[in-house]
Image: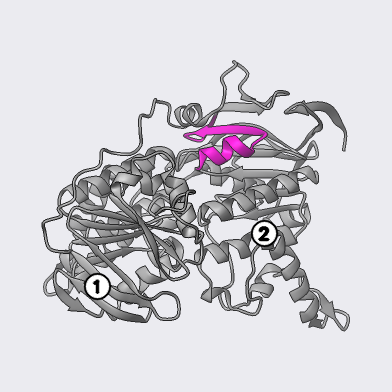
Amino acid sequence: MESQSSTRGGGAVTTPVPHMGVRSVTVEYPGVRALDAVTVDFHAGQIHAIVGENGAGKSTLMKVLSGAVAPNAGELLLNGQPTVLRGPRAAIRAGISMVHQELNLVPTLSVAENVLLGREPTLLAGIAVDRRRQQDRAREVLSMLGAELDLSCAVSELSIADSQYVEIAKCLASEAQVLILDEPTAALGEYEARKLLNLLRRLRDEGRAVIFISHHLDEVVDIADQISVLRDGRLVAQFTRNSAGVLQSADGTIANEDTLAHAMVGRELGSIYPVKGTARPGSDAAIELIEFGAVGRSSGISMTVRPGEIVGVAGLVGSGRTETAEAIVGLRRAAGEIRVAGRTHAFAHPRAAMRAGVAYVSEDRKGRGLHVSLSCIVNMTLPSLDAFSQLAGARLDDVKERSVTARWINELAIRCARPGLAISSLSGGNQQKFVLARWLETRPNVLIIDEPTRGVDVGAKAEIYRIIAALAQEGLACIVISSELPELIGIAHRVLVMRKGSVAGEVTREHLSQVGCDERIVRIASGLSADRQGTS
């Protein structure tokens, strides 16, 4: 492939000719134009980031590049030549592989089988799978990610973060020359995300074209060689890293988190975090855990959350945060005691928890959060169907269902062409808003939210934070589990830090307002003293 010499950060590098691109590509769905005459090039040996609000067209563009969607107009170029990809398999044959925002794994197959699905090494002239080579290759690819997984374990038994590793490993195993990663760090903690970004740099330096979508603008500014900004399906800004290592647009604008956010939403954004209200320390506990845990995953957890209080839960991947939350609402076998409003409970399933005023918003919106083949309206009202029933449950009040759905669409600024469409037609971030809204509609007294803004753009994050803060002011008790430390620091009154299935420490409101509180959380999560000096 021809290339021309340039520099990055003062060192000699190579800027290749475009390896892949689109010209005036337009994609239309019923009631919405997802892409509007977009033209962009992707180079081998570069990391090209695509950013934009939820519904801006990012995932649609990636589906065009990976052969999953055929454009209504425009053309796809590969090595400078017009190309028609008739499906994802054709894209894989052309050397293009994609990690989707929503996991695309076979839950009943093992880790090794998923990593090499469709590329199994064989024996006996292709009659049988060579299990040893399959395991060796899967282990090799996962080691590139620093992931130590049981290769024989069924994917259904993995956490979301570990499943994300398998999804990425599956992409790497293809040895594709164009790698498309849609929100690859959304389910990962800060440490794990850093490892992945370092791997992407290595893949870029090997000469691959890496296309990277992320709502984490700090990651984008750190890693990208080029940035393209989409808004309402149109390309509105582009930035290229110059010879001094600075990301700059043609008009001289420097790319940083603020300028990217402004380009994405078309307006200035102030602080995305609301002013923290005051918890109600004198009131009785809304929920209390006593020596609680998820059997086999966590234990000995004692915590109290009062009305109006937002308690954050931090920890590295595998620390037991999600498993503990699932045990609270009956999704896992629990040990210990739960008290809600002073009464002891043992929830057999989430509906029993809901009746007691405890709602859980899962991090797994596709597996446990939504029924993706059903409409937005049905998804909104499923947890609270009793409120919409008429004639002793013989029928549902569809007028009320539509009204409630419209109210939440407006309240959370959800981009939805028609509420009657399947919720799978929405972008991942807009689906995430529906997950939150459907449980808020149950009017809980205790809300447990796992990764509340996973896959959500910066503008929508501000709306979700505002709603959580407003609900807390009204007396809701909130437990927020998050891998994003700025999120926990910005909205929580205090943060519990988990390590190896137990609470390793707590960061108080006083410490959350101090410089370096993120380092304090990381040190506790890593098993170190809270402060460098060794004091806690």
Dot 2 corresponds to which residue?
145
Colouring of the image: one colour
- Residue at x 41%, y 65% (from the top left corner): 321
Pair 2/1: label in front = 2
Quarter occupied by the C terminus:
bottom left
Question: Disc 2 to disc 1, how far (Cα)?
Answer: 37 Å
- Magenta-colored span: 216-235
Question: Residue, x 47% and y 59% (percent of image)?
Answer: 525
The vertical placement of 13 against 428, above or below, is: above
**Residue 259 placement, left or right of 330:** right
Height in image: 351 above or below 175?
below
**Amino acid type for the residue under numbered disc 2:** Leu
Disc count in the image?
Answer: 2
Residue 40's mark? Answer: none
Write down the residue under mark 1.
353
In the displayed structure, would residue 446 be above or below residue 112? above
